Each structure stands twice: as C-alpha cells, then as structure tokens.
Image: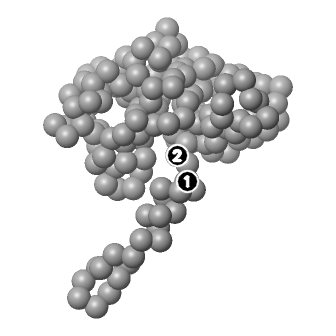
Amino acid sequence: MKVERYPYRGRAWWGEALLAESDRCLLVDRDDGQSVLCFPRSDIDFTLLHEEAPPRSCPEGEASFWSTDVLRGATDSSDFATWHSQETTGEDGRDVLRTFTDPSVDLAQLVGYGAFDPERARVEVVDGVDGDERGTTIKRFPTWGDAKHLIDVLDVRRDGDRSFM
C-alpha cells in the first residue's frame, strides 16, 4: 500500500449533513486496487458520530468504527438525491467512518486520520481554485481518469516469460 497527500479538497456527506471537509486528505492506494481517501480527525465533525466498540480489524490495520444517527433527509436538488440514493448502499449510518487506531507499520502516518465508507457515505472531491466557481468540478470518490492513472494503464509490464500486461 502507498500513502500520499491528496491534491484536492475532500468532503464526506450523510444525506444533507456534512461530516467532513478537508484540504489535507491523504490517499491510500491499496494493493487490491481500491483507493481510500483519509481525512484528518480535526476536519471530521464528530458531533454527528458515535463510536462503536470495540475496535476491529480493517485492511489498513486496526480501527475504531463510527456511526451516525442523523437522518439522511430530503433535498431540493433532484441531482443530489439521485446521485446519493443510486450510488450508496447503506440505508443506516452504521460504521460509516473508521479511524485508524493501530495501522500496519507501513501505514503509521494514518494515525490521526479517518476514512468514510464510500458505499455508505457520499465521498466527493472538489477540483478547482477558491473563488472560481465556473472552473470547479465536484467528482464522486474514488475517481479515475487523471494523468497518473492513464500512464499506469498504458504502461506495459512483463507478466511471465511470454506475456505482458
């Protein structure tokens, strides 16, 4: 697994409730291909969450799991409601966040960070410059399609004596 600073602002929503927003997120590229966006604990609104006990194992090590009792609620924006209801599967707020209490040795920098389950919460990335709303785009996380991913896809690698991938 590889950890690097994420260059864009991240947000995590539960319905209309903003659970986290940060310009200091970390991106974890896991070996299984699933990327994880990690928010600093200081940028997570823990007043909307309660900790489940005890800590449990996760792919990054050991973590505390957090749930929310906030109702998802309705919204005036049909785009928002459609985007959220079709792309998240969790109907209740159970285990929507995990905070890393004892990550594996190679991920020690994740102490003090938490990751929202993108199948349960809406995790989005804001790509733009402050003050320029016309040039700002909001994308669902995990994203695909930046230059780094394209180079990785196009990079041919040997996979045995007579095959490449």
**Residue type for callout 1:** Asp
**Residue type for callout 2:** Pro
Which residue in the protein does label 2 denote?
Answer: 142
Q: Quarter-wise, where is residue 95 in the image?
A: top left
Please give the name of the residue rendered at 47% of the width and 71% of the height, measured from the top-left corner.
154
Q: Quarter-wise, where is residue 52 in the image?
A: top left
Tell which tag, 2 or 1, sits nearer the viewer.
1
Which residue in the protein does label 1 denote?
Answer: 146
- Which residue is the extreme one toward the bottom? 162
Q: Residues at badges 2 and 1 in contact (C-beta under 8 Å)? A: no
Q: Quadrant of the C terminus?
A: bottom left
Up/down of 159 relative to 38, above or below: below
Please give the name of the residue rendered at 67% of the width and 25% of the height, measured from the top-left corner.
130
Label 1 crowding class (10 Å Cα cut-off): few <14, some 14-19, many 20+? Answer: few
Q: Mark 2 to mark 1: distance in Å?
A: 12 Å
Circle 1: element type: loop
Q: Do we see residue 162 in this rendering?
A: yes
The residue nearer to you, when weighing 21 against 63, is: 21
| 72 to the left or right of 118 | right
- Which residue is the extreme one toward the top? 47
Could you tell me residue 133's position as x and y percent?
76, 30
Label 2 crowding class (10 Å Cα cut-off): few <14, some 14-19, many 20+? Answer: some
Q: Quarter-wise, where is residue 25 in the image?
A: top left
- Which residue is the extreme one toward the left? 105
Circle 2: element type: loop
Could you tell me residue 32's position as x and y percent?
34, 56
Please give the name of the residue rendered at 50% of the width and 14% of the height, measured from the top-left corner.
45
